[in-house]
Amino acid sequence: MTQQKDKIKQPPYAILRGGYKYKETLGMRRVTTYCMDMVESKDVLYVLIRADGSGGNIRRINWKDEDLDVFGNFKWPVQMIQDSEGRLFVSDEGDHCVHSLVDDGEKGYVPIGQTAEAQESSTKTQKIGEYGSGDGQLDSPSGIAFDSDENILVVDTGNNRVQKFSRDGKFIKTIISGDGEGALNMPWGIAVNHKEEILVSDWRNNRINIYDSNGKYISSFGDIPNSLGQDYTQLSGPAGLSIDDDGDIYVADRDNDRVVVYDRDGKYVTQFTGDATLSKIGKTYIMSSPRVLRLREMSNREIWRKLRSPATVRTYGNLIYIPDFGCHRIQVYEKESYPLTKDEIFEEPNHPTLYNV
């Protein structure tokens, strides 16, 4: 099941963290080339990829790491989400819009405007938005997310704002914009938590901003006094983000080649820097070429394990998917956690000292 198909879940009162285990690597170059985002749907994964130079598509793979097919035609895609009806939405900063695609049962996913249903209905649309700075217009859109009513929140990067649309493409309102405290500077990723607060990764300000459902600024975390992250808690060029069922926040800290995890209050938990092993499809390719086998043996395999410019991160249940943009693959981790009730854990101390336990 996809994370976006259900109402936003209420996280437990607290959790016991058991840890994070590396699970496996999926994809390879020529299959999941420059992977930007992904959606888990039933027994397949839809992977949003970019071509060398320009353009992009959606690649469909499965857990056997088999390349099933490719569809879609985008100029410069950024993110992808799936609604409760199975429709896919893809933000395209090159085409200044969000594409809508539906599975028609025969041809697979096609733009909504090309289906028989769409031709009979004036409320359906193939693209959401057009280039510009007015209401309902977009300039290089990036992050997209659903609110609790499955309206689409679109990060309008070039206009430094967030706009809300219905799934049928009707402009509803501008949620976040303007100057002052909480003003955005080249925003990228977006997510909505159980309180219906909106989290936006503020790329050039190197921070995550939190707003209420009406766009009022609440707070920020992860920002730094200079251009590079100097410790575990600081971000540099944050891109996509995701919130899991426990309320933990995952941020693709792109310029630092890692994913950083914070709790629901913005406190640092841990980070992922990469543990990749050879994917199944990668092994098949390498084993077929003696020359590639030798080149791999001569290379620095420690570097190959690491993340390189991750574009986003997605959570589905206890699984964490990291589209490893610079290495053309997806690294998958598994989280171990146990929900706790208020009666099972001592109250948080008011004084910043440690308990003796």
Image (cartoon, rainbow, N blue to C red):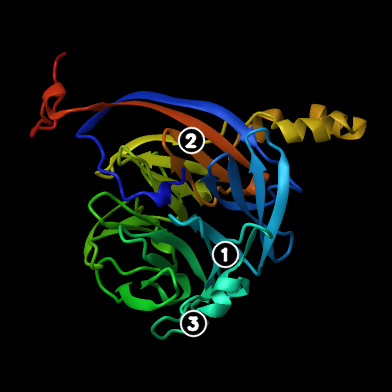
Using a 10 Å C-alpha cutoff, classify the residue at mark 2 as few (fewer than 14 neighbours), some (14 to 19) or many (20 or more).
some
Q: Residue at x 38, y 46 (%)?
A: 234
Q: Is residue 72 above or below residue 138?
A: above
Q: Earlier in the sequence, mark 2 or mark 1?
A: 1
The secondary element bearing badge 3 is classed as loop
Q: Which residue is mark 3?
A: 122
Task: Give the amino acid type for the residue marked by disc 1 in the picture.
Answer: Leu
Q: Nearer the viewer, mark 3 or mark 2?
A: 3
Q: Is residue 171 above or below residue 186?
A: below
Give the residue at x 29% y 51%: 193
Looking at the image, which is closer to me, 290 or 56?
56
Residue 112: percent from the left, percent from the top?
57, 70
Instruction: Identify the mark nearer the N-term, 3 or 2.
Output: 3
Question: For the residues marked 3 and 2, what is the alpha-carbon distance in whole angstroms?
Answer: 46 Å
Please name the amino acid that badge 2 sits on: Phe
Q: Secondary structure at mark 2?
A: strand
Side of 208 relative to 272 (left or right): left
- Image vertical order of residue 336 relative to residue 56, above or below: above
Residue 146 is at least partly visible in this image: yes
Depth check: 191 or 61 in front? 61
Q: Residue at x 26, y 39 (%)?
A: 11
Mark 2, residue position:
272
Q: What is the spatial separation of the Cα atoms under label 2 and label 1, in whole angstroms? A: 32 Å
Res. 286 image quadrant: top right
Using the rendered image of the protein, determine whether residue 202 is visible from the camera's viewpoint: no
Counting from the top left corner in percent of width and height, residue 121 is at: 50, 79
Disc with the residue nearer the chain's start (3 vs 1): 1
- Which label number is shown at residue 101? 1
Extreme residue toward the top, this view: 357
The residue positioned farthest toward the right in the image shown: 290
